[in-house]
Image (spheres, grey):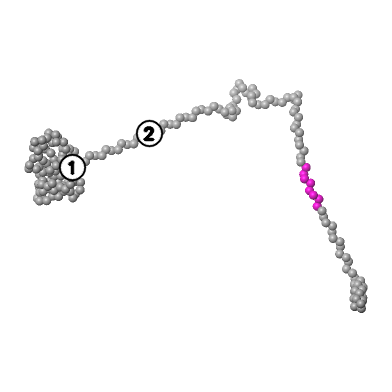
Amino acid sequence: MWGPVHTADVAGRNRDSYVVMYVAQNPVHIDGKPLRLRVALRSGQPDWIGAATRSGQVLGYGYWQLFPTDPANALRQGWIELQLWVKQPWQATRWDTDGTTITLPKRRTTPKPKPAPETRTSPPPAPAPPARAPTSQAKATQPPQDNAAADPKPDAPPEPHEDAPQPPAPPTEPAPAAPSRPAIVVPPLPPFPPPVPDAGERRTRFARWLDSARRSRRT
């Protein structure tokens, strides 16, 4: 759709968008009743639709839709709008503008709600452990009372009397004898070497050998 621009301004109930619009010369008829037809380009960015000037022509590319969608509401208010929401800059084109511009009021932005501060609750204190009854050892460490100082301790053994018979001493086992060691056998000393013969005895033995050698040659 395209046509001459009649209106350029901030739009919306919260004034958080911009519109460039013209009113068609011929009305439309719903249920036999004529209604004014408004052709509008709407966007959150004023530069994409040239919302700063009311001159020239406008052309929009995209999916156009009717508002309101209920014909009964359109008949009640007396007009219906054919609108295109421009979500990319290439969806709108302006030409034949005379260069005049208007100062557009800034659109209102809905403030984001501040996050609620986190409330940290401290954990409940841990229950105290149950009191324990004093043990026998703790009772023994307590100091004795004045009225019970002369009384003997119930746990102390009775003192022995002189006339009481003494229990016999337990038998003692003899200590084990030490193992006997085997006797060490010492070998006898070797006999002394025979005395060395003197020179005379050596000659006699040599003479005997020489005689026996001669006899053996003769035989």
Task: Give whichever of 114, 58 is nearer the camera.
Answer: 58
Identity, as a three-letter code, of the amino acid under mark 1: Ser
Q: Is residue 181 magenta?
A: yes
Please give the name of the residue rendered at 54% of the width and 27% of the height, measured from the top-left corner: 133
Residue 154's x, y, as percent?
64, 24
Task: Give whichever of 184, 145 is nearer the camera.
Answer: 184
Looking at the rendering, the stretch of residues picked out in magenta corresponds to 177-184
Q: Is residue 111 left or right of residue 101?
A: right
Return the residue at label 1. 17
Q: Main secondary structure of the magenta part?
A: loop
Disc ID at residue 111: none
Instruction: Report the residue that reaches farthest toward the bottom.
Output: 218
Quarter of the image holding residue 138? top right
Please give the name of the residue rendered at 17% of the width and 39% of the height, measured from the top-left corner: 12
Assign the C terminus to one quadrant of the image: bottom right
Task: Give whichever of 67, 16 is nearer the camera.
Answer: 67
Q: Is residue 210 visible?
A: no
Return the residue at label 2. 121
Q: Earlier in the sequence, mark 1 or mark 2?
A: 1
Identity, as a three-letter code, of the amino acid under mark 2: Thr
Residue 187's x, y, as percent?
83, 56
